Image (cartoon, rainbow, N blue to C red):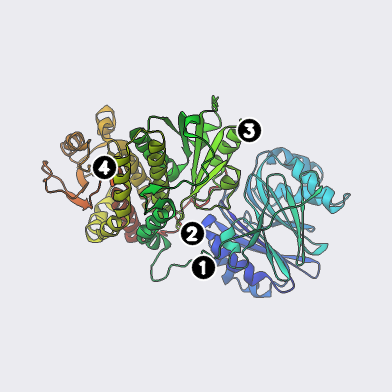
Amino acid sequence: MCGIIGITSNKSVSAAIINSLRKLEYRGYDSAGIATLSNNEIFELKAEGRVDNLEKNLSISNMKGNVGIGHVRWATHGIPNNINAHPHSSDTVSVVHNGIIENSTILKKFLVSKGHNFKSQTDTEVIVHLLTEYLKTDELIVAITKTLKQLHGSFALGIIFKKQPDLLVGARRGSPLAVGYGPNENYLGSDSYALKSMTNKITYLDDGEFCLLKKDQVEFFNAYGKKINKKVLELSSNEAIYDKGDFKHFMAKEIEEQPITLKNGIREYVDNINNDINIYNFPWQISEISSIMLIGCGTAYHACLMAKYWFENLTSLDITVDIASEFRYRKNKFKPSTLYVFVSQSGETADTYAALDLCNKNNAKTCAIVNVIESSIARDSNFVLPIHCGPEIGVASTKAFLGQMLILYMMGLKLGFMNKDINKIDYVNKIKDLKKLPELISQTLLTDDKIQTVTATFNKAKGSMFLGRGFSYPIALEGALKLKELSYIHAEGYPAGEMKHGPLALIENGMPVVVLAPRDDYYKKTISNMQEVIARGAKVLLITNKSKDEVFSENIWETIEVETSNNDLLPFLLTIPLQKLAYYSALKKGYDIDKPRNLAKSVTVE
């Protein structure tokens, strides 16, 4: 969570910092702040809420200085207000911080005993006072290394110093941080998306490293304060500009982009001439893999659950799924024949990265499925499968979810064929069906009118349920999550067959229940479960696929039909109306769809 930008230049930096903070706002929007250095004085300005509030402050125009730092916050320690907003400053230094300092309470007691006075409730402020304390007696590099050594937890830091008029310092442990290079200026950022508008030349800091930036010089150091060399990467420039266009929200645009997203993914991986799936440079023989563990958080976890059904159908491999935040705290039995697959949109998800790090320490086989190929998870995995979605700005994931599912499905299909679990004819036919999917998604996106009609009922309800069996169950979970994220309506996803084991007690007259019942192997059973719900007074929104056969059930409130395909691909189509249901529900309530309360896009804290 949170976003950092820092610039050291031969010109005033405040306007460029504000512009970058706007790009970073999807990472946190509880508060925002900026600090610049001019005439050996630190000037600090902060505001509760959005970057707009910061920019409205008339003092912003008076913020001079050729070096500065900025921050957008997602609160962890201390309520969102001006005092707790970053940067935090003393007479000597100013700091912005992503992450959590786990021993901040102990450090604060030590610093108070040294005469330091704290203004905020944040863990970050201990960094300010530690640096200030060490700088009384130590030169800069020593003070930085001593400070970083004292900090337990995760951090990405941007720091400016009163007595260093052109210096910007960055440090990283756990939370991502990158250095960008420009003419007569250099940059620090928590997100390459914010830096791409200024440069496409970037170096990523690894854990334990810090850097010293001046407008014409960049130096890197390890955790012991020794100079090291780092590679400069050149990023693709085709994602540098991304705006809403004619859409009211990024999420609306990203939902409509999904046919293009899938087409891009298919083009990258499918050999049209040979009707084959190319997974280039796969580093293992299929005989070396007997099981796969899929790991993710939130929406990515739902993509993993979806993949479990596909992999079990398409391969004879043993498949398990785990939530990343649980994985690292269990006694895992790492096996050399297990492939660990990590799914993350940003590639910076802290819990997922921690699980990957644990696997790497145990010499496990690791694969990343990410949207950002320069990310920490991508860089530290043995093998990477990009989803090729382009930037996703809306906090509630849409096109990245379909992109994750697409890559996972193609991976399962390819591994099943390599392992001789599916024959050539079935393999080729499934690929042919897959190539039709973008057009089917385009047709399914035309279901707006009916979805807008039903949102009023959901908005009036105190809660709702989403039910599905088999392939539809993970999509039910994702649909419930989307409604919670955007409309703040209590929603739960359940396996339809589990209703009679407890959740039926929650059904009351008029409660909206979404039933996902495509014409697949589970269809008749799901319709029976639907009748149990209707009999208790629920208003059922049935989502199924088009068919010549009528639905044999009475008293259905509304029915939405998606396009039809083979059973493997129906989950992609069922996802579309659920995304639109959440979007239009939040739209009618007047909520901030791209930035829902208490959430941020890139979850870089545990």
Q: Which of marks 2 and 4 is in front?
A: 4
Q: Mark 1 points at which residue?
A: 241
Residue 458, how many percent across, how many down? 27, 50
Give the numbered dot on residue 361: 3
Looking at the rendered structure, the kind of residue marked 4 is Asn
- Give whichever of discs 1 and 3 has the lower sequence position: 1
Q: Give the CA separation, mark 3 to mark 2.
A: 31 Å
Q: On the image, numbered disc 2 is attached to which residue? A: 391
Q: Mark 4 points at which residue?
A: 567
Other-residue count near label 2 (Cα within 10 Å), few / some / many at <14 / 14–19 / ≥20: some
Task: Please state which amino acid type lies under the numbered disc 2.
Answer: Pro
Q: Locate residue 5, reporting x and y percent.
A: 64, 61
Q: Earlier in the sequence, mark 2 or mark 1?
A: 1
Foreground residue among 286 and 240: 286
Mark found first going from the N terminus, 2 or 4: 2
Q: Based on the displayed image, in which of its 4 quarters is residue 251 positioned?
A: bottom left
- CB of mark 2 within 8 Å of CB of mark 1? no
The mark lying in front, picked from 3 and 2, is 3
Q: Helix or strand or loop: what does disc 1 sit on?
A: loop
Q: Is mark 3 on a helix, strand or loop?
A: helix
